[in-house]
Amino acid sequence: MSRHLAAAHDLVVPRAVVRHGTTTLVDVADLRIDAGHALTIVGESGSGKSVLAHALMGTLPPELVAEGTLEVGSLRFDLADRGGRRHLWGRRMALLPQEPALALDPTMRVRHQVAEGAAVWKPRAASALRLADERLDHLGLAGARSAYPHTLSGGMAQRVAYAAATIGGAQLLIVDEPSKGLDGDAVDRLAGLLAAHVEAGGLLLTITHDLRLARRLGGQVLVMRDAVVLERGPADQVLSTPVHPYTARLLAAEPSRWRFPWMTTPEPSGEEAPLVAAHSISKAYGDAPLFDDLSMEIRAGERWAITGPSGAGKTTLGNALLRLTSVDRGTVAHGPTAHGGRLQKLYQDPALSFPARVPLGVGLRDVMRRHDVDEARLGSLLATVGLPRDVLRRRPDQVSGGELQRIAIVRAMLPRPALVFADEATSRLDLVTQQMTVDTLMSEVVASGCALLLVTHDRGLAASLTSRAVSLNGGGEAEIVTTAAQPAMPGSSR
Amino acid sequence: MSTSLVQTEALAPVATTRKPLVRIAAAMGLLTLAIFAITGPLLLPDPAAQDLSRYLEPPTLAEPLGRDDYGRSVLSRLAHATRLSLLLAAACVATALVLGTAAGIAAAWAGGWVDAVLRAISEAFVAVPALLVVLLVSALASGGLWALYLGLALAQWVEYFRVVRARSALVLGSPAVEAAGLLRLGGAHVVRRHLWPDLRPLLTTLASLGMVTSILAMSTLGFVKVGLQPPRAELGLMITESFPYYDVAPWMSLAPVGVLFLLTVCFLGLRSTKETR
């Protein structure tokens, strides 16, 4: 970060417009990134923030048309000209893409991948590799130099992608949704790296829906919605005392600020037989134990969270409790009320949990026929989640992630489940959509008296939704924390 | 990653129901050949009726493809040969498809020893060239129709088995099937809603290629005189029989070659060119 070619120049975009056909995806004026001050764009998905980042970078898909200019110091670039900025990539401007696990080449060792971006890179030259090693060591990845990307955790892959993006010494760094799928610690670490880039005089543009990251980076914040900027200003001001009502709604969508009626509904404290009883179960992948000698019981109506850093085995534990995965030792017993499709699961990527080539309604009809559910129940569930009936005529790839997750909730609720296992079910959704989705899920869960098993890396979300937690530390130790008598009070999280 | 760049909903093109021109043309061609193969044998004279006085008669209006070296009607023989080729190929493909798909799904579903046994059998078949399998079976049953059918079907089922097994394992391991299991929707639902929609485009492509392979294999065997025996009208046999007369009666060899060519092109053109997800 100290190898910037020239003195730091500010980046100015007087106007940027991106269109697809007759739809305007982005229309932003007076965008300015000052050296030494971060610029963060927040907003819900579909607001055009990622499109704006790609328009600046010159990496828009060909069917999108961009207009406007980009000024860096004395240089001016036409946004419509995609090729014009290509020679700046890596050296002057770099993009840290979404989902680094997918952006890295799975067939290449980490250090070779990182070395490719270095200015001194030549095939089989040692100097670029040395530089890559240096960068990786600096990021605390010395042990992962010759690892393949699939062996890395999400946070490590993110840092490798960061090393690869910045090794060329780019002054302008554009970061697209860096916190997606990362746990809190990994986001904090990344925020430290980004802050260091800014302190060294770099230009930083971050696209995110993670307000905590935006607060952490400071600088200026833009709030985008429906292609336009609704509010802009210093981060601490916009993100604490918003002027625009939409910004206020965005802030209220953070789990720690939720106020929902179901949050104060006490759980039933009956002494019924447990739905799911795990007796001293253990599971390890290779030498790495996920949990060892763990016993727990889930009773009707209880709300449980499984928390822990990524890779700690949260999903595996949940699957083991539903008997979708075998355990190495111990037993998992299901109570009489848990049989016959009364244990349901919501998936992190709802698109993968529906048959891909079948209209959604067809799949739901099968569920209704199997479990003798009448049409009225489907209608009322759809109304609760706020979806029109027409949506069922579409295939899974024709609806947005938030809508699809709500249809998944409808599907899970149709057989009147005794337990719903939500496996990071909202971690890919933006804050507003997450709030809406969780609200529909919890309203249904509380209304039907079914138990909840929530897997999440978001401690705020876990605290808002549940009163009992299994906390995995990633080293095989599990701790059961119960705040049972008192359901989590709003605002008391973390 | 780029999927989230622009909401797919906004950009999803209007679903086009118009099929490419090539596929329509191929379907029309096949339909014409099928009508010829069905109605020809009913309307035209006996393909085996000899009339030595009309030896190698050139094409006329009444006999558009002339007569062969025994004075038999080439058009009539061609209609019978086309019917035989289409029916036998369809039977072989249907058998191979049903057998291969069922075995593939069973192997992917059951895993364990079922998978191991089925894979071992399929690998034994892969190790032997397909034409050799047909030759072996034909040799055992010396040129009968049944032997040819059995040989061709046995040579082809492996292809379906391997493709279906690989694809089914992927589908059966997906969260969608896990969710169906939690909903207790049963095996029929998994086959009908998950496997079949996913396998169908693969199977249509494989089947249209399989038709071509069967038809060509049949005529190849006829050509080298191990397949069906004269006086049966068969495309490969017709080509061999017409060879000695190619300079005096070119219509005799051109007719079966033309039909083979058309069948091949039409079946290849029928394949879906659309990218399957």
Image: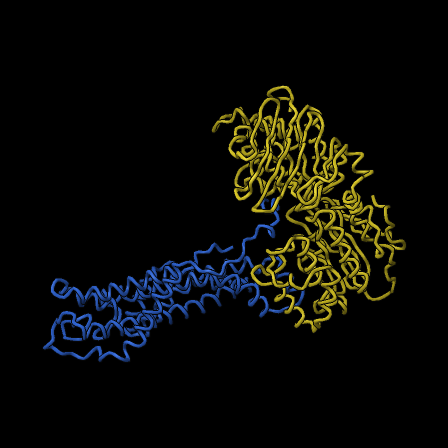
- x 22%, y 80%: residue: B46
- Residue A6, percent across and down? 61, 19
Please give the name of the residue rendered at 58% of the width and 28% of the height, measured from the top-left corner: A132
The colour scheme is by chain
Classify residue B110 as left or right of residue A427: left
- Image quadrant containing the N terminus of chain B: top right
Q: Residue furthest front?
A: A22
Q: Quadrant of residue A179?
A: top right
Residue A424 appears at what percent x and percent y? 71, 51
Q: Which color is chain B depicted in?
A: blue
Q: Is residue A81 left or right of residue B86?
A: right
Residue B131, given in percent of the width and then of the height, sits at 31, 62
Above or below for A35 versus A216: above
Q: Quadrant of residue B221?
A: bottom left
Q: Residue furthest right?
A: A485
Is residue A143 among the parts visible in the rendering? no
Q: How many marks?
A: 0
| Outermost residue toward the left in this view | B53
Front-lying residue, A247 or B93: A247
In the rendered image, is residue A370 in sight? yes
| Percent x, y of residue A439 | 78, 55
Q: Which chain is yellow?
A: A
- Vertical relation: A332 (above or below) A492: below
